[in-house]
Image (cartoon, rainbow, N blue to C red):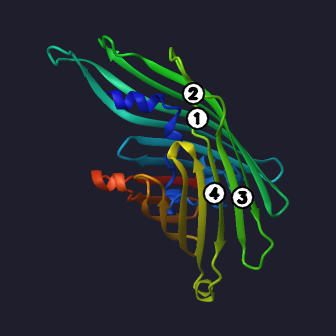
């Protein structure tokens, strides 16, 4: 119980956890990816400006720590830009509270994190795009039943993400991008003496499509990306590289590698299928911590465009 309670209080550390199957499959190197769809709400809202149609999506992940689910909806407009909304739940699981003397179950401990977000993105000309996301973040650690001295821990705050993408005027198309996430007041937990700052993240990166004639002739594509990420909550700087091999814009194979201090580094793989307006993406990560516990994180995204 104690580690879970501490994790809940520590400034919304769930905001550091990678999100989305497309991103996870490419080592999180997606800040310059213009095709992320509603996953862009998490990484760089500017990418929403390139969304060709409305998108309704469910994004799920299962890690050694928690299961997470996000419901997203985005509506693009050539005149007004793109508006998007999302609701995110992180479930750390339930735990029985027991009597200290008899061991009899007396209650159920629950630990949840929540995020509600609204995003707006717009292109500026044919090369530049900018985006903004407002987030309401909340955590709640509580016990139902006869829980005795087990405290109810709750807290909330608001935050802003800002991001931009720019397509360079080069022969080979290269997109450069940057995002700053979780700008806002510290997360104040009820009855706590000190608020915990949110994990501010700065991420920059670039992405390009490799000009291989054989791939073009086969109606295939190969995109390469590389990102750098700075966040004091992870001990400094992290990096990632990603590859995405597509065929007829219907089938994709993805691979990536995350470089990070501690046990967050490791490879990732993913696949995606897109047919008509329906798409499914699946990815798995193989970082050091998950390998030790034998439970590689799994990400699944299901989306519909119409």
The dot on residue 112 is none
Circle nearer the N terminus (1, 2): 2
Is disc 2 in contact with disc 3, using a CB cutoff of under 8 Å? no
SS for callout 1: loop
Query: Mark 1 or 4, which is nearer the eye?
Result: 1
From the image, tell me which residue sits under label 4. 31
From the image, tell me which residue sits under label 1. 198
Mark 3 burial class by Cα count in 10 Å: few <14, some 14-19, many 20+:
some
Give how far apart the Cα atoms at labels 1 and 3 are.
Answer: 29 Å
The dot on residue 50 is 3
From the image, tell me which residue sits under label 2. 187
Is disc 1 in contact with disc 4, using a CB cutoff of under 8 Å? no
Give how far apart the Cα atoms at labels 1 and 2 are.
Answer: 6 Å
Quadrant in the rendering for residue 196: top right
Circle nearer the N terminus (3, 4): 4
Q: Residue at x 63, y 53 (%)?
A: 203
230, above or below 192, in the image: below
Query: Left of 103 or right of it: where is 182?
Result: right
Give how far apart the Cα atoms at labels 2 and 3 are.
Answer: 33 Å
On the image, the x and y values in percent for residue 227 come to: 60, 61
100, above or below 199, in the image: above
Give how far apart the Cα atoms at labels 3 and 4 are.
Answer: 14 Å
Is disc 1 in contact with disc 2, using a CB cutoff of under 8 Å? yes
Can residue 230 be seen in the rendering of this structure?
Answer: yes
Circle nearer the N terminus (4, 2): 4
Q: Residue at x 58, y 46 (%)?
A: 231
SS for callout 2: loop
């Amino acid at each position: 119980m104690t580690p879970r309670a501490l994790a809940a209080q520590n400034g919304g550390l769930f905001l550091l956890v990678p999100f989305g199957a497309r991103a996870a499959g490419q080592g999180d190197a997606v800040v310059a990816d213009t095709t992320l769809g509603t996953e862009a709400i998490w990484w760089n809202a500017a990418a929403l400006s390139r969304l060709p149609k409305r998108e309704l999506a469910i994004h799920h992940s299962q890690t050694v720590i928690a299961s997470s689910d996000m419901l997203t909806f985005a509506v693009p407009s050539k005149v007004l830009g793109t508006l998007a909304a999302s609701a995110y739940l992180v479930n750390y699981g339930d735990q029985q509270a027991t009597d200290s003397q008899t061991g009899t179950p007396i209650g159920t401990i629950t630990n949840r994190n929540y995020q509600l977000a609204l995003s707006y993105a717009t292109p500026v000309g044919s090369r530049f795009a900018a985006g903004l996301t407002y987030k309401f973040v909340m955590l709640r650690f509580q016990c139902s039943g006869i829980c005795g001295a087990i405290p109810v821990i709750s807290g909330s705050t608001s935050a802003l993400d800002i991001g931009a993408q720019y397509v360079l005027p080069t022969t080979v198309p290269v997109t450069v991008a940057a995002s700053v996430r979780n700008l806002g007041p510290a997360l104040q937990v009820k009855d706590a003496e000190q608020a915990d700052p949110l994990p501010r993240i700065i991420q920059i990166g670039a992405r390009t499509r490799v000009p291989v004639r054989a791939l073009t002739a086969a109606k295939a594509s190969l995109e390469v990306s590389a990102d750098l990420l700075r966040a004091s909550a992870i001990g400094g700087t992290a990096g990632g590289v990603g590859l995405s091999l597509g065929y007829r814009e219907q089938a994709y194979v993805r691979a990536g590698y995350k470089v990070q201090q501690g046990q967050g580094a490791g490879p990732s793989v993913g696949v995606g299928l897109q047919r008509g307006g329906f798409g499914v993406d699946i990815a798995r990560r193989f970082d050091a911590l998950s390998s030790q516990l034998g439970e590689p994180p799994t990400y699944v995204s299901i989306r519909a465009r119409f």
